[in-house]
Amino acid sequence: MPVKRTIIPNLRYRDAVPAIEFLCQAFGFEERAVFADPEDASMVHHAQLVLDGNMIMVSSVVDSEFAKVLTTVEEAGGNTQTLYVTLDDVDGHAEQARSKGARIFMEPEDQDYGGRSYSVLDTEGNAWTFGSYDPFAES
């Protein structure tokens, strides 16, 4: 069977377990799978979180060949990428995130290019933007 071509962001967290909890409670993700170390439940080797049929993967910071090319926001001294998630109710989503302790750094506002969005940091400083502008929609 052919593989479904898709892009799945993979985020690393020093403290992945509370990060996963935050992403689910504040942003609405659901756990699809979480593979923790059997001897250390705080070490997440691989997790799959889904939102409206889309996925992100989450893992703990580990010492591996793959990890040698990765860095956390803290190690980089700031974000080197952001994630953009489309949704309908920007203001309601912002309030849900705020109620769970999210650090919103750009309040919901209408954008010149269309739609409405807000930007927020997760538990370890990764930047997310949630907006109603859909770049795939026909003009």
Image (spheres, grey):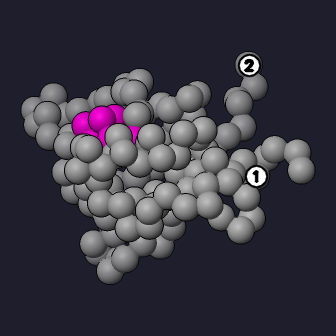
> Vertical placement of 138 versus 21: above or below?
below
In the depicted view, which residue is nearer to us: 39 or 131? 131
Relative side of 51 to 100, left or right:
right
- Mark 1 secondary-structure assignment: loop
Relative side of 46 to 9, left or right:
left
Q: Residue 72: x percent and y percent?
A: 33, 66
Q: Which residue is mark 2?
A: 1
In front: label 2 or label 1: 1
Residue 138 in view of the camera: yes
Residue 45 in view of the camera: no
Q: Which mark is residue 125?
A: none
Around disc 2, counting alpha carbons within 10 Å, would you say few (fewer than 14), some (14 to 19), or many (20 or more)?
few
Q: Which residue is mark 1?
A: 135
Return the disc, 2 or 1, that comes first in the chain's sequence: 2
For badge 1, the amino acid type reads: Pro
Q: Is residue 90 magenta?
A: no
Furthest residue toward right? 139
Q: Is residue 22 magenta?
A: yes
For badge 2, the amino acid type reads: Met
Seen at 60% across and 38% down, the residue is: 88
Relative side of 59 to 56, left or right:
left
> Vertical placement of 20 versus 109: above or below?
above
Q: Which residues are magenta?
A: 20-27
- Mark 2 secondary-structure assignment: loop
